[in-house]
Image: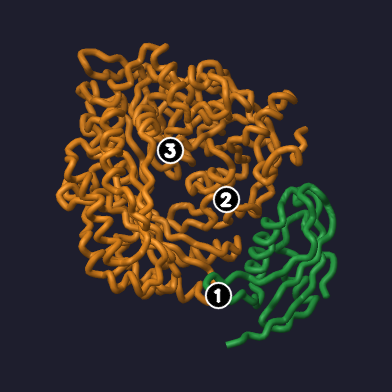
Amino acid sequence: MQIEKFAVRLILEKSGDMIYFSQLDLASILTRALRRADLPLYYTQGFNPRVKMSFGRALKLGVAGREEITLYFTEKITAEKLQEKLTPQMPQGLTIIEIS
Amino acid sequence: MIDFCSVQKPQRYIGNELNAVKKSHRDKIPICISYPDLYEVGMSNLGLRIIYGMFNFFDDIACERVFLPGEDLATALLNSNTKLFSLETKTALDNFEAVGFNLSCELNSINFLKILKLGGIPLKAKERPELIVFAGGIANPEPLAEFVDFFYLGEFEEGIGKFVEIFRKNKDKKARLEALSEIDGFYVPQFYSVNIRFNKYEFDKLYKFAQFPLKRVYVKDLDKSFYPLNWLTPHTQIIHDRVPIEIARGCPNACVFCQATKLYQPYREKKISTIYDIAKTIYKNSGYENLSLLSLSASDYSDIEGLLDVLISEFKAKRVGLSLPSLRIDDSLGNLYRKLLFLKKTSLTVALEAASDSLREKLGKKIDANKLFEAAKIIKSLNLRTIKLYLMIGFPEETGEDLLSIATFLDKLQSYTGLSINVSINIFVPKPFSLWEGAWMCREEVLGEKIKLVLSSLRKRRNINVSISQTTKSILEAILSRADRNFSSVIMKVFGASGYNIAENWQVWQNAMEECGIDYRTYLESKNENFPWSFIEGSKTSCCKK
């Protein structure tokens, strides 16, 4: 059974204390934030389903800046709704700049 | 200030985890608590999280955390004359009113002293005019008695309210310690003297209102006791990267080597409804993708099937992993195995302890190993990759036959299941308060022989991987858990030796013991009538002077 997936592109800014967290850390920080926000998440298929997301170029540890991430949902979700639900779950130093 | 980019894994020192509590210290009693190991290990400890949450529940307490820094940060601190600081507000440790340690692992004693030293805190209790160092989780506090102002015996949930009350009322260290020592569970070593007379430890109290004999304190109602629902969620990976949901405390079994059974008496369970509420709230507050049901023996939970049904129906759709680490084989392979299929276990873990039936019986380990063979079909249907077995060697009454039966057993299991087997063999350590606390620990050379015998009987097995614990490490663990107050001089010597990881070096310990004139065998061969820890109730030979 193929579940339809809806992609949303996100631009995040890493600053402050969050610059010390690696790309791997970022994936789990985002996963947990999405889970807390109770969004209709799309999971990877296979033995150990994970929340699907894909990353653009990674920032070096200790460097502030922007990163592009694509998230996937099982329903269409508007930019406003995602912003509203996800923002309160983001740690300080990780700011949503743009959703498209 | 330290440049965090210059050290490995700076994530360890930032202290900005989700649900971390940062309070200003103004008009508050600042307390720092620690598990004396690296961040990734310490953050995996449930006790520390419970205490952190409980302390911060009080408006006038600011409780923060500190862990053992990596060698690189420790060097950077020393080079820049900076004191080790708490994670939350980066306050130097010597600016706290009290610093508490979880000392449940004996081998962390040196780490504990390292943290004090790096934090600018004098090591010995009597060298500290104001700051109070306290510790818990330790069965026999005696080897560390000189360094700690008070130990809490038992479960600190019961004592924390009294602690706060006394710290509010008294500002002077002596007054605080005196008031604490009058309450069950609080052990202030400087208020007691210990002497050995005629092969017997004699204990006297030096402060007349101090409790004596000392009692361990237990949580009466686990359903009502505090649980850290605002789960402190690290932004980086830790060793046990899942949320432990405690379902029961203590264990109804009585295996002779087990210390936990005795330390966490009596056996208490949480209700399914309590566990469900806790799991649901913690998931909501943390978003953690894995939950693990924690207890010493999940199989003994009275309605484990009912509990799993409730949790699986809540978390299945959310793809939250559930794990059950302490199941007996009867359950793993009996009526629970269909539920386990959902849990997607890739390995089956069996704490068998001894391969021969007769030895297992002597140990009080109620496991029917034949279940494994009978259920070979089920094992195959579970899609497992490996079977993990825990065994122990070094028991006083163990025979060569017992040891050789390990190979026979593993071969049979391998041929029945066709799976690869990982065997982890630990060395028996007679732990204080366990039923066999008075048993002798085997000598190194005897242990060496036993290991040789087991390994040679297991040679050339392709699908059987064996790991055996190091004899010297087990001997050291035994010494540290069984020693008396005299041993603190050895700990000081080892601490003073150079090198960041000296605590693991047996040679350094041996030299230190020799220099201090201590024959460690006396701790491992109980020739005395009682033990260094006999002033605490629960030891078989508790003998207290009136």
Q: Quadrant of residue B218?
A: top left
Which badge, 2 or 3, is on the more N-terminal residue?
A: 3
Compute the Cα span from label 2 to label 3: 19 Å
Residue tagged by mark 2?
Answer: B238
Chain A shown in which color? Answer: green
Residue type at mark 1: give it: Gly
The residue identified by callout 3 is B104
Q: Residue farthest to the left?
A: B358
Q: Which residue is mark 1?
A: A46
In space, the residues marked 1 and 2 are separated at their CA atoms by 25 Å
User: Chain B drawn in what color?
Assistant: orange
Which subunit holds the residue at mark 1? A
Q: Residue at x 48, y 17 (%)?
A: B493
A49 and B459: which is toward the camera? B459
Q: Residues within 10 Å of mark 2 (few under 14, many from 20)?
A: some
Secondary structure under badge 3? loop
Q: Residue furthest bottom?
A: A1
x then y, percent, for residue B128: 56, 19
Q: Check whether the beta carbons of the residues at disc 3 and disc 1 lie within 8 A of each other.
A: no
Determine if residue B140 is in view. Answer: no
Residue type pointed to by label 2: Ile
Question: Image point 65% across, 47% down: which residue?
Answer: B21
The dot on residue B311 is none
Q: Is residue B292 left or right of residue A75?
A: left
Chain under numbered label 2: B
Q: Secondary structure at mark 2?
A: loop
